[in-house]
Amino acid sequence: MRCLACNMELNDSESTRKSQITGEFIDLCNHCYSTISNDSEDVDFNDILDINSYLDMADKTDYS
């Protein structure tokens, strides 16, 4: 599966992220998803989150 925005291959945690509202898969990599994460309600399956995905999401967190 590939990111709908940048066409990068999605890892397991990225490919299972779903919208809480519609129940549809979001299909965005962590980098692309970080641009809308504050405006989106999602369901992440953290049980399959690997360390690289966690670090990638932590790097994109806006603490301002």
Image (spheres, rainbow, N blue to C red):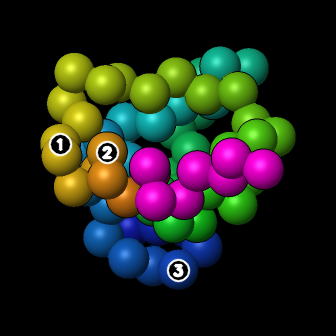
Percent x, y for residue 61? 58, 50
Cβ–Cβ below 8 Å for labels 2 and 1? yes
Please say if 20 is above or below 32: above
Q: Secondary structure at mark 3?
A: loop
Percent x, y for residue 16? 37, 36
What residue is rendered at 68% in x and 47% in y? 63
What residue is rendered at 31% in x and 53% in y? 55
Q: Is residue 42 visible?
A: yes
User: Which of 23/32 is in front?
Assistant: 32
| Magenta-highlighted residues | 57-64
Residue position for label 1:
50
Q: Residue 29: within the magenta?
A: no
Q: Which mark is residue 54?
A: 2
How many angstroms separate mark 3 from mark 2 (CA)? 20 Å
Amino acid tagged 3? Cys
Amino acid tagged 2? Tyr
User: Which of 6/33 is in front?
Assistant: 33
Q: Secondary structure at mark 1?
A: loop
Residue position for label 3:
6
Q: Residues within 10 Å of mark 3 (few under 14, many from 20)?
A: few
Q: Is residue 33 visible?
A: no
What residue is rendered at 53% in x and 31% in y? 18
Amino acid tagged 1? Asp
Q: Mark 3 vs mark 2: give the one in front.
A: 2
